[in-house]
Amino acid sequence: MPFLSPVTRHLSPTTRDSPGSFPLLQFCVTLVAIISPFRAWRYNPGRVPVQQAVTQPYDKITPAMQERYYETSPYNLVRIILGKRQPEDSETENVYTRSAASFRNWRQTGILQQDSEPSLYRYSQTFTVPGSQTMAERNAFIGLGRIEKYSANVVFRHEQTLSKPKADRLDLLRATRAHFGQIFMLYNAAGTVDALLDSATATPPDIEVTDEYDVVHRVWRVSDTSVIASVHKQMRDRKLIIADGHHRYETALTYRNERRAAAETGSGLPTAYDSVMMTFVDMDRPDKDQPGLVILPTHRLVFGLPSFSAARFQEEAKKFFNLEEVDPGIDATRATAILQNAGRAGTALLVVTAGRAFLLHTPKAIGTPVFGNLSLSQQALDVVQLHKCLLEGVLNISEEAIRNQENVTYCREASEALAQVQNGKVQAAFLMNPAKIQQVRDIAFAGQVLPQKSTDFYPKLLSGLTIYALE
């Protein structure tokens, strides 16, 4: 298939790729993004309603959601991507072997059917922007993207990853040899790629699902070879940023390397495991008044510190920020408004304890050794200020402890964060504004990374709309 052939090119010293990439030396060979169609496995609506089968991404499924998915249908995807562990599990019978058995059975019995032609899949999400009455639509397409090392400067990350989730996803991939959710990728094309796929939406969608957050997901299959060829050509010069799915991307890279090492002979031609399923979203569409790219904050909750004191925290925090005391009985609506207003001038953090609350702004430590070797652009970000100055600097929680979530956990909703403080489950909630898409782009293209869970793109891409089986 021509779309899978490797591509290289030669560039002069003055040549640049899309905005944010780096100048390349003369005669330097660089890899490019290789986007391909595939024959997706999809739920057979005659056997199971898709509404009852698809799920949120595995890392967003709470125990309560897992239970609800299990009860919804015996064919719900949760049984594969986040199955229940049993006390009697062993090396030969466990959550991963059960996932593989379910996937095999569902294909054999027609619960899942494979599309007859290699296709790309137009994907739209219509939703209400959280905290507002604004309706928005995010347009994208699903396809295969060739896996590249970060050093190839084709795929860029913006967040750190954790070893435990990657080990879990790798065990699942080894067992099932399939990808059930897409890596959320950002690229720049000013709407030109989307325009090639717009004609697909003139027909009724192949899939339409409303999820538990009232987000409407629609998918159209695009098998026209001329359209696919045009998309392939347009995407070749694009740089890709992982918005969501860092763990799954790095897992796919590890698995690819494993399979290459295990192969006794190699033709040099691309194989199924050289690619992973991705959803591509243009972050530079001309219709910028449509806020389809929404980033939510992920708040930090601190617990289990043996000598936490709000008064001591107040004094120490003054070394890093200007500090104003606010009403400790503040609710989520007011907290969000305060943060948004203060954030117009720069960094703003709201810290709420059982009896005190503080607004922190006007950072004082930028350019000091507190940030180590981090660039000035990283130091200016709210999440970096929070981690380096407050969690590490004031509360003495080590970077390793933060990664292992020993004293820090995460929360999307400000109301939930405040409730956990009020009921005594945590000692303090650290609320912040979301990162901006321009900041994410600049950090990624500079080859830098942010702390884990620095961004929360909303809405999430549903798992199970399309499935990519490696064999």
Image (tube, rainbow, N blue to C red):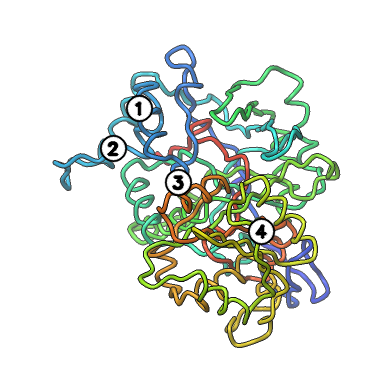
Determine whether 183 is above or below 453 in the image: above
Mark 3: few, some, or many residues within 10 Å (few <14, many ≥20)?
A: few
- Which residue is labeled 4 in the image? 32
CA distance for labels 1 and 4:
41 Å
CA distance for labels 3 and 4:
30 Å
Mark 1: few, some, or many residues within 10 Å (few <14, many ≥20)?
A: some
Disc with the residue nearer the chain's start (2 vs 1):
1
Mark 2: few, some, or many residues within 10 Å (few <14, many ≥20)?
A: some
Q: Provide residue 267's location: percent of width, then percent of height.
A: 45, 55
Numbered tag placed on residue 59 in the rendering: 3
User: Which residue occupies 68% across, 85% down?
Assistant: 367
User: As shown in the figure, which amino acid type bears the numbered disc 4?
Assistant: Val
Numbered tag placed on residue 84 in the rendering: 2
- Which residue is labeled 1 in the image? 70
User: Which residue occupies 75% across, 40% down?
Assistant: 230
User: As shown in the figure, which amino acid type bears the numbered disc 3?
Assistant: Asp
The quarter holding residue 30 reads bottom right
User: As shown in the figure, which amino acid type bears the numbered disc 1?
Assistant: Tyr
